[in-house]
Image (cartoon, rainbow, N blue to C red):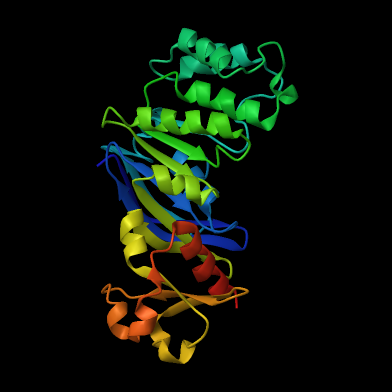
Amino acid sequence: MLLKCEHLTKKLGQYQLKDVSFTLEKGMILGVIGINGCGKTTLLRSILGSYRLDQSPEDAGELWIGDWHHKTQVKEYKGSMAYVLQECPFSEFMHPFEVGEKYGPFYQGFDLKKFKDLVKKYEVPEKKMISELSKGQVLRLQLAFAQSYPARLYVFDEPVGNLDVEFRDGFYETVRELVSNEESSVILSSHLVTELEGIADELLWLGKKDDEGYVRYHGTTDELRDGYRILSAEDGEEAIPPEMIRGKRIRESHKEWLLQATDGDFAGRLPKEMAGNLRYPDLQEIMYFVEKEEER
């Protein structure tokens, strides 16, 4: 086991991410998904230590990376992580190479030459200050820094939204390389769930009810999809067991229902003429149906 998260609860204003527990094994990529405001960034910043878990009476939880505890072995715990965040953690008045020269010595094993080579490879303008860079260039700069020292856990918070398609493909290849040694792991949050579905070994799906975020699902994509089917038909909802319906969508020529059955027996509960119209949903469809239905 590389990361262990136990009963993490974090209060921010009126919002609370509540009782999040999961583990992450070595060599794995964990995708974190959910609607805006469900707590993806709150979770990642809590894991990184940017948000402490003792700042309000409601805060709670324990975190370990290997044997290092987030409170009793802070230096080792934080030093074992690399990250790319939505907001740049570096001074906006620095030039790219200065980032490595100033911040690099704080990270054991930081390779300044590798950092500068990656800055050039990722085509980050060397003579501009960070404040003059585009959002995509700032993300590339962070990625170069994260790859320049040996980390055990890589935490990427929505890193691909401002990257062009070609660079995104290269980024995903980099993520796979980071875990190829079977010693490091990656946590990657993204709203591009179709792309995430193709790279993540496991998913952590956060839900939101009122002002509270919670774990809706943790496991593999295949395990999640196995519990659902899409049924397409012109009509006939009265023939579908109501406890199976998790959502409905009306098309021009037909209707679609998202059905759930934990035992996997879909066809046996439907009329034969309907059972032939079942198919597996993709991850984006599951999220759409479930979250839209809960908004009603």
Which residue is more in the foreground, 67 or 282? Answer: 282
Which residue is more in the foreground, 191 or 266? Answer: 266
Task: Mark yes or no: residue 52 visible.
Answer: no
State whether residue 45 is above or below residue 227: above
Which residue is more in the foreground, 161 or 272? Answer: 272
Looking at the image, which residue is at 36% across and 27% down?
177
Q: Seen from this angle, which residue lies furthest top?
A: 113
Q: Seen from this angle, which residue lies furthest right?
A: 132
State whether residue 11 is above or below residue 198: below
State whether residue 70 is above or below residue 10: above
Looking at the image, which residue is at 51% across and 10% down?
117
State whether residue 99 is above or below residue 164: above
Looking at the image, which residue is at 41% across and 19% down?
149
Task: Mark yes or no: residue 201 visible.
Answer: yes
Percent position of residue 93, x then y: 71, 20
Percent position of residue 125, x then y: 67, 15
Q: Quadrant of residue 66?
A: top left
Q: Quadrant of residue 108?
A: top left
Percent position of residue 145, x then y: 51, 21
Looking at the image, which residue is at 62% across and 63% down?
14
How many marks the image carries: the answer is: 0
In this picture, residue 130 sits left or right of residue 161: right
Q: Quadrant of residue 187?
A: top left
In this picture, residue 83 sits left or right of residue 67: right
Percent position of residue 1, x then y: 24, 42
